[in-house]
Amino acid sequence: MPWTMDINPLGSLALSALVAAVPILYLFWALAYKRMKGHWAAISAVAIAVLISIIAYGMPVNLSVLSIFNGFLFGLWPVCWIVVTAVYIYNLSVETKQFEIIKNSLAAISDDRRVQAVIIAYSFGAFLEGAAGFGTPVAISAAMLAGLGFNPIYAAGICLIANTAPVAFGAIGIPIVVAAGVSGVDMMAISKMVGRQLPFFSIIVPFYMAVVMAGWKKAVEIWPILLVSGGSFALTQFLVSNYIGPYLPDILSAIVSIIATVIFAKIWHPKESWTFEHEAAAVGRAKLEFTAGQVFRAWAPFILLSIFVAAWGVKPVKAALDQIATLKFPIAGLDKAVIDHLGKPKAAVYAFNILSAAGTAILFAGILSIPVMGASIGTALRVAGKTLNQLKWPIVTIGTILGFAYLYNFSGMAITLGYAFASTGIIFPFFAAFLGWLGVFMTGSDTSSNALFGKLQEVTARQIGIDPVLTVATNSSGGVFGKMISPQSIAVATAATGYVGHEGDIFRFTLKHSIILTFIMGVLAMLQAYVFTWMIPQWEQVVQAAVQATKAAAPVNIQEGINYLIATFAISLFIVILSRIIGKGVVK
């Protein structure tokens, strides 16, 4: 017999909301105060949430456990599948020393510390965020800056500030995928909305970094290159997120930003190269130690990644791959066994899309990258094992956090909190940004924040009469600024720069910047909610729905998808062969 959720089980909405918030408050305490490891914090928070769902909400034990299992499955596939395959490509690049060429090609562009920071921490960091996310960009870019001679606190702090605007589309867009899956809001609509918020900050962040590093006057001295870097990124981010989807905004925007900034840096230089006070007046530009062919070969795996992910985003390709190998099965005992607060049964059907998952696209890119990087089969397998071992606890954490989020949704606790937050009335869009910020601070991940609060944002928006597309997107957009103060991110940054033990210094370095930028995002969300309502893509959804309704009978052209796949593999093989021919040489 189905169980009906009760969103006010204690008879007082305030009291019910307080009880529902206990697991979240515990998670905040465990991560922020006790500095508990992420997986243990997540596991213990789930245990508390289970007890509350059973005791306070009257949820049957089997439904509580099954809802966690459902979320954990989604966390494993497709979320962790993306993380594993993306980090694998990076690890293989490091193992084969191809990444040394990438580092040298970036460091040889300019001797000005401000320019180096923008290229490495902002543009290249954004590329790494798009390809892998989950701490990878901060670890790599901070290590690179430290290796170039940056003061550790600036190497770490600047990279944390830079790792903001790209975060919502990080790890091949997985934060947006999770936000859509948890909230029930259309994924493309969220992608569009985030793409109408973060580009403003994508322009601001390079200037912000330069001011933090060198002060306002010195930042203004290089405004042309800052505008080129941030402006090219912002424009590409808007176009890709609004007209292609959430998977590639970071990767394509970063590539455009890197190319535009590098070309501009070759033809324009500041009058004086700026360095830190402890350095000489000029540090000297690094020499490019490799041929153009070797540089192309080093970057080829990430070019392949972009090509495959772009192809997987084409609708006929997805349809063809789904038709070949997709398994869908209801979660026995949970599917339609919960009646929500509107009297509708909640579906619990898991889709195991073996081929059409974005992680599978990355896997193909990784396989083709093996000959590109000159790795043996033994090396490739060893790196794969190393990657799985490296990510074993992040996998547990991600799966558990998503189980936690699904339990909140199926038990009604998220709905309770949503109704409570609705009491903030018309100013809720402002607090929606800080809610996302809090989630990322607690979990270290925009993905996890969206999993925790995505449904809450959707429910609250409907309660106060605001389009949920805005608030769900704002959760992700506001959350990006919590990344720079997250204990996990700070730990990664200090480890990468050899600054372990000084986490408090980094936290104080970034805290005020985090709050300032989140405040601005909250103000933007308020303006979009009540003044610039035309920026919310609601009307486009209506038009698209009408078009889809007229074409409902028209089948997707599977042959077209197969043709796309053939072309993708043909182009990729050409890149593999070309990289091997022109990229010969020994990496130093």
Image (cartoon, rainbow, N blue to C red):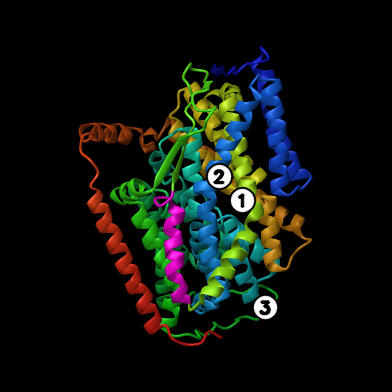
The image quarter in which residue 303 lies: bottom left
Q: Is residue 444 visible to the viewer in this orientation of the structure?
A: no
Residue 119 in the image, given as x and y percentages of width and height: 51, 68
Q: Say which residue appears at 63% left-offset and 22% top-offset.
A: 59
Q: Is residue 65 above or below residue 264?
A: above
Q: Position of residue 158 (x, y in %)?
A: 61, 61
Q: Going 71% across and 27% down the picture, which residue do you hit? A: 51
Residue 395 image label: 1
- Image coordinates of residue 372 in percent, x first then y, are 44, 75
Mark closest to the chain's N terminus, 1 or 2: 2
Chain part drawn in magenta: 354-373
Q: Secondary structure at mark 2?
A: helix
**Number of marks:** 3
Disc on res. 279: 3
How far apart are the two marked residues, 1 and 3, measured between alpha carbons? 42 Å
Q: Quadrant of the C terminus?
A: bottom right
CB of mark 1 within 8 Å of CB of mark 2?
A: yes
Q: Dot 3: few (<14), some (14–19), or many (≥20) neighbours within 10 Å?
A: few
Q: Establish if 368 lies above or below 172.
A: below
Residue 3 visible in the picture: yes
Considering depth in this image, is 539 or 383 the residue closer to the camera? 383
Give the mark nearer the N terminus: 2 vs 3.
Answer: 2
Tell me the distance, in whole angstroms, between the alpha carbons under discs 1 and 2. 8 Å
- Sort mark 2 into few (<14), some (14-19) or many (20+) by Cα contacts within 10 Å: many
Dot 1: what SS?
Answer: helix
The amino acid type found where label 1 is placed reads Ile
Find residue 75 and name its label. Answer: 2
Separation of disc 2 and disc 3 at Cα? 47 Å
Task: Locate residue 429, reporting x and y percent.
Answer: 52, 32
